[in-house]
DNA sequence: CGCCTCTTTGAGCTCAATCAAGGTGTGTGG
DNA sequence: CCACACACCTTGATTGAGCTCAAAGAGGCG
């Protein structure tokens, strides 16, 4: 993990994120004062569960997976954070917080590491900003609820739903879209609460039928309507 | 569903909730202006999913279950809201919101029904209050994440975890505690994503072993340590 | 007394987990 | 440049937890 101080160039980069639209440059500078940019390699953790939460993060590029351990020790992936996502903000306002999850880099990634003090002083005091963050959380909550609604559905539905939810952001569903985060079969399994083998059987079936195509860890949804259909089948 | 205007007596009742500690009576009155008290009978919905979200609610007494429909039509229970819980607040700040879930009364219950306008005007403008609500949400999020962590655990673990999470609030885990919300086997099944029959098999096994005792829909945890143990077994 | 909701038990079946074995591609050190 | 490790993918065979289906009892209420 390499740290570099946030320079002025970063401000321009931040302005692109929806979280900060309509926020003045002056204010933005305050929000990032004493922040650092961290670079993480593939599989490198940004922070571990149960450690003290002194910082929160804003994903700049690449992606991170947020995970917990199941009682039997296997990882359970709770969420994938693409660029623009905020990680750890929801617990910043709690007294003496600890991270409830482990955050791991997927591919080389960059994040803005912001001290809790700055959150308490400059973020939490701004109603507009709190609401924007609350909005991100609400979205995450709704996604979790939608996944929960599939708990009794067959495994295919869950996998289909995961893929769609990863591309769903803003754009409407269309064919030949690439899933923006590279995923191993194991990661998909850990996301939907299944096993590598089962995921492989499902995905190779879809590949044969021409619904998706995969290359390394890159998944392309070829026939989006078919995949959407699978979510609701049965 | 019977509506009555919020009277001054309600203010005293509200002051007991942790959400409002340190909030002045004057301010509290503003927060509840034009609010109404609604009485719901057992199984009566407070609001249905996909209807316009013009109000949010504070549970006064009784309880509510928040649920969705799975694609195949069975209900999936996402959360139980005991007194003091806020329902629907997280979507109030979104433009033109719709309820993402259905809320149904468990036993006769009372709730304070507050118009969205009041939320936008008096709740959302108060940083302290937003953070308190955010805190409730964070707790709910963490609970959902913990349940998710059990996705690969056997059914017993999920049921045990549900029971514990329902009594867990504030008090530490001890024997002979009654689950504060009356639950049918079906509701438990819909909560953990299972079937009535499976829940019955598990719970009658526990009853035989003397870990729990049930009477109508009231569940008493007799040997809490045994139940906690089951969460982590396997 | 009939209806409705909830609970219970048994029997059979199925989906996905587990176990086992092998394949492929990439990086690393001798 | 080879061989060895490692991470990931694939396929087949077997198994079992929990679902489905069926049937019935128990309590409450108009």
Image (cartoon, coloured by chain):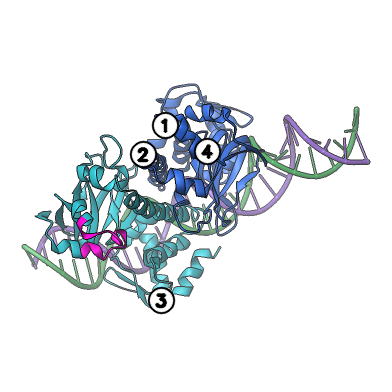
Chain colours: A blue, B cyan, C purple, D green
Q: Mark 4 = which residue?
A: A32
| Of the image marks 1 and 4, the number of the one nearer the N terminus | 1
Name the secondary structure under disc 1.
Answer: loop
On whether disc 1 and disc 4 are found on a single subunit, the reply is yes
**Image quarter (top left, top right, bottom left or bottom right) of the N terminus of chain A:** top right
Q: Residue A54: where, in percent of width, then height?
A: 55, 52
Q: CA distance from mark 1 to mark 3?
A: 62 Å
Residue B74 appears in the rendering: no
| Of the image marks 2 and 1, the number of the one nearer the N terminus | 1
Q: Are marks 2 and 1 in contact (CB under 8 Å)?
A: yes
What is the chain letter for disc 2?
Answer: A
Q: Is residue B18 magenta?
A: yes
Residue situated in front as seen by the camera: A66 or A232: A66
Name which residue lies at 31% across and 68% down. B180
Q: CA distance from mark 2 to mark 1?
A: 9 Å
Height in image: A198 above or below D14?
above
Q: Residue B187: where, in percent of width, then height?
A: 31, 58
Give the class, few, some or many, for how many residues have Cα within 10 Å of label 2's Cα (few <14, many ≥20): some
Name the secondary structure under disc 3.
Answer: helix
Q: Mark 1 = which residue?
A: A23
What is the chain letter for disc 3?
Answer: B
Of tags 2 and 3, the one toward the viewer is 2
Q: Mark 2 = which residue?
A: A128
Quadrant of residue D25 in the image?
A: bottom left
Q: Residue B146: where, in percent of width, then height?
A: 47, 56
Q: CA distance from mark 2 to mark 3?
A: 55 Å
Q: Mark 3 = which residue?
A: B208
């Amino acid at each position: 993990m390499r740290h570099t101080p946030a320079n002025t160039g970063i401000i321009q980069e931040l302005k692109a994120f929806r979280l900060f639209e309509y926020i003045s440059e002056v204010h933005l500078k305050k929000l990032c004062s004493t922040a650092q940019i961290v670079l993480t390699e593939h599989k490198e953790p940004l922070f571990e569960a149960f450690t003290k939460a002194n910082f929160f993060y804003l994903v700049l590029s690449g992606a991170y997976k947020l995970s917990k351990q199941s009682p039997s020790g296997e990882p359970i992936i709770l969420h994938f954070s693409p660029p623009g996502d905020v990680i750890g903000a929801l617990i910043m306002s709690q007294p003496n917080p600890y991270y409830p999850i482990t955050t791991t880099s997927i591919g080389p990634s960059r994040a803005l590491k912001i001290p809790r003090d700055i959150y308490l002083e400059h973020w939490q005091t701004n109603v507009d900003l709190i609401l924007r963050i609350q909005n991100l959380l609400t979205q995450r909550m709704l996604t979790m609820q939608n996944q929960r609604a599939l708990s009794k559905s067959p495994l295919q539905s869950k996998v289909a739903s995961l893929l769609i939810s990863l591309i769903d952001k803003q754009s409407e569903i269309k064919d030949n879209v690439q899933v923006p985060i590279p995923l191993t079969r194991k990661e998909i399994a850990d996301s939907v609460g299944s096993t590598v083998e089962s995921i492989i059987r499902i995905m190779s079936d879809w590949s044969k039928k021409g619904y998706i195509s995969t290359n390394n860890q890159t998944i392309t949804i070829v026939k989006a309507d078919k995949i959407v259909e699978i979510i609701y089948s049965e």
